[in-house]
Image (spheres, grey):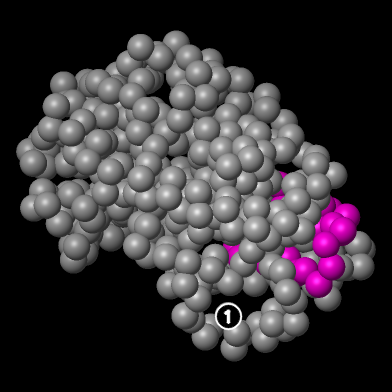
Amino acid sequence: MRVCMVTSCFPPSPGGIETCVLELASRLTQKGHEVTIVTSSRGLPPKTYNNLIDGVGHVIRFPERFAILEIPIVPQIPSTLLFDFNNQDVFHVHGMTPSQSDLSLLFLRTRGAKAIYTHHFDPQTRGGHLTKLYAYFGRPFLKFANTIVASTPSYAQTSPFLNSYLGRVRIIPMGVDSDRFDGHFNDSYVLESYPGLMRFERRILFVGKLIYYKGPSFLLEAFAKLKTKNVCLIFAGEGPEKKKLVQLANFLHVSDRVFVMGAVPDTVLPSLYAFSDVLVLPSVTRREAFGIVILEAMASGKPVVATAIPGVSDVVEHGKTGYLVPPANSIALAVAIDAILEHPSTARLMGETARQTARTRYDWKEVFARYLELYES
């Protein structure tokens, strides 16, 4: 089978969509299928690339010259679908990325090609006004997909993009490599680079882009309110909020207990989860539609504190694998984090339940099997 995946970004660009596309492409290739990925140059210098990557497939990258509101503007991605790739059996479009995933679906329908569309998130700006405008204009393009995939029921049901197409939506969650995130700390990078971490008995972890919609400032404010003593907070990720977080930590007089690591090597992440006591994902908007880092923490046997927003609230089982709190509420975050840190036996039980849930419900082996069935149909 020949599968062409269309995505605005692909590794080395970091992110949930990139991880999903890489996992699907790698597993398809391992099964002997031919994979082509059409994407942008994000994460690399802006030029055209045409590479055959071992174990992944044929990756074609078009130059990202500029972006609007974080959206890479690369008109070559949809336009090339009009004329090229005539020998593909299935096209899989990942989005929603304005001007790319929408036009890709339109152009594929124009040429009569079969297309699966995975809706990873609703495009959402800080004020929300452009979101409503784009939902009005972008939603009609989804009718050109043969099948629409959403990662959770709650996100699909509340999405202004998907609520008109629920009869055509299939639920397939994101996945995690359970064997990779096995809960064992065996990497010296963390200890050598941040020896100060060893001073603390408890460690709170945030993994992800330091950007407003993930709510890192609310977590920092919650950290300053904790009752638990001898605890530190680790931010693993880069983003536009990094400088603001450092300034806020100084203002709150907690800078000696806050470690803003920046981007850490991907090989280090499993150990960083194992080294921590709890993962916190305090996202505040629909840009966070699932939270792959939640699965990584769960597979590592760690409880999670997250916000009760659509998508995320389907992944975290409140009181079983962690706690859900209202978004943009630092007091509620602090109470939930304290509840885990001050009750280690409960935290261990939550962690074990989380590990079993990740392995039985969200392992990439199971998720890929569901996608493969969809491709073959």
Direction from residue 26 to residue 229 in the image, left or right = right
Q: Residue at x 80, y 50 (%)?
A: 334
Q: Secondary structure at mark 1?
A: helix
Note whether residue 47 is visible. no
Q: Residue at x 44, y 11 (%)?
A: 164
In this view of the protein, which residue sits in the foreground, 142 or 326? 326
Q: Residue at x 45, y 19 (%)?
A: 162
Q: Position of residue 353 (x, y in %)?
A: 50, 49
Please say if 85 is above or below 154. below
Q: Position of residue 261 (x, y in %)?
A: 65, 72
Quarter assignment of residue 266: bottom left
- Magenta span includes 52: no
Q: Position of residue 163 (x, y in %)?
A: 48, 14
Extreme residue in the front direction: 345
In this view of the protein, which residue sits in the foreground, 54 or 226? 226
Which residue corresponds to mark 1?
190
The stretch in magenta equals 214-241
